[in-house]
Image: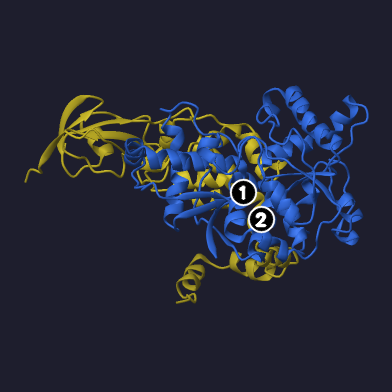
Amino acid sequence: MRIPYFPGCTLSTKAQGCDVATRASSQALGFELEELPEWNCCGATFPLATDNELALVGPTRVLIAAQEEGERLVTLCSICYNVLKRTARFLEQNEEKRERINLFIEEGYTGQVQVLHLLEVLRDELGFEALRERVARRLEGLKVAPYYGCLLLRPEGEIGLDDADEPAILHDLLGSLGCEVVDFPHATECCGSYLTVSAAGAAEEMAYAILDSATREGAEMLVTSCPLCQFNLDYRQDEMGKRHAGFTPLPVLYFTQLLGIALGLDSTEYGFEEHYVDPRPFLEQKGLIAAEKSQAVPAR
Amino acid sequence: MVENTVPIYIMGKRYVVPESLTVMKAIEYAGYRLVRGCGCRGGFCGACATVYRVEGDPRLHYALACQEVVHPGMYLVQIPFFPAARATYRVEDMQATPGALFRTYPKLLQCLGCGACTKVCPQDLDVKDYMASAMKGDIAAVARASFDCINCGLCAARCPTEQAQYRIANLCQRLYGSYLAPRSEHLKVRVLEIEAGRFDDALKELRELSEKELRRRYNEREVEE
């Protein structure tokens, strides 16, 4: 099944490995993700003021590009998903604003595009039971904590992917891959987001709280869907180790990287070498990737 | 025979000029001597960026003064220079990576995708599209899409987030040319041949010809169809 796909800026650059894993695992499950022929940045944040129409222009253009290809658009990055879904909903419900923006950009968005996250495609169109059957390499004994972050779920009334306080979608996906799913209290706590630029110390503490919480519950790995979460959780684990006695580094993966491995696909191009906490030794030790595929890389 | 004339407004002052003149010629017809905002007169140097409106229509239009023929009731002004921010860098010290692009022009990531830049481009470039490519770190795509840019500055002038689109394009063009463009292998081979002296005798012979003989040989040379 063909679905128009919006990778977003980060999956095209820093998180390219995630894009590769996403396309490969989707294809293996029968979903042909077709990248929009032309697209621009989603805008990264949904405007905080309701009359900030100029900031809606970028995501509206993405929806117009999607409109050319069909009625649905799937994305993976939590941030892109948040912006595009809320924009689509806003434009669908506010005809006057939609017309104002259409007039400004001289285009005709009709307000019909449905923005989907890959997780809901897998849950609602494939089904996690069906996914379980397609797993070639069950991840038995792998203790994985699903980390949702903020933008994938909130604001619940506008996103509606899952319950914002007690989500289950990533838990269920990991369960169907055979993982031992580690539920932990910080699964929906903020990773620090853009504070990583303006207040790195605060961001480090927020990420530490999440990693520490997951470790206490027995997690060996964290899985997420957001490149910014992945970065914040991954990047400063060295410093956390220096600041907090007994800190255990945890590899942080995108769920599609793990999905690809579980489906028996070749994960060489999934960008593991770009991670700050290299997941390869851990994955090798668990027999999930072949030893010879991992080259020892000097610390970044 | 007297040509038809039309009224135009140069910086708000009314003049009557022959209707077939370009904006640039009309400004000179009106008695101005252009010392800025005038260059190649051929639509190639980007000096004569012009913003205009036509009486009765609130929409703004953008053009090159040397190319655009006057419109009756035209209100115009020229923008010979626009102070778009230019980063200082040495291409020799850089690599053609998205990181290098973002570090040199970090403001690039604030682009809204509004399309004002595409609307104003007198070369009909899709500036918004190459800015989108820049945000994706695709240096080669920016270099190719911006090839015909003449650095007139209109895009930067109209940008709500104050991007310097053409400066970013120039950086990408330079990085592309230095690091990404395919190298011509036959050029390398030819340079080696020249250094090995393969063409020395032929050049020596040419230098020793009389002008008459040189001209004869030139006129009778083989030309590929």
Can I make out residue B106 in this image? yes
Q: Residue A214: name its quadrant.
A: top right
Label 1 Cα crowd, 10 Å radius (few <14 / some 14-19 / many 20+): many
Percent position of residue A60, x then y: 44, 43
Q: Is residue A205 above or below residue B139?
A: above
Determine whether label 2 and label 1 are within 8 Å by CB: yes
Residue B19 horizontal side relative to residue A111, left or right: left
On-image quarter of the C terminus of chain B? bottom left
Q: Give the chain letter at badge 1.
A: A
Residue plotted at (63% across, 31% down): B88
- The residue at which mark 1 appears reads as A76
Residue A41 horizontal side relative to residue A248, left or right: left
Q: Is residue A81 above or below residue A293?
A: above
Residue nearest the viewer, comparing B103 with B148: B103
What amino acid type is highlighted by mark number 2? Thr
Percent position of residue B44, x then y: 41, 46
**Rendered shade, chain A:** blue
Residue plotted at (68% across, 40% down): A148
- The residue at which mark 2 appears reads as A22
Q: Give the chain letter at badge 2.
A: A
Q: Is residue B77 above or below residue A176?
A: above
Percent position of residue B149, x then y: 46, 45
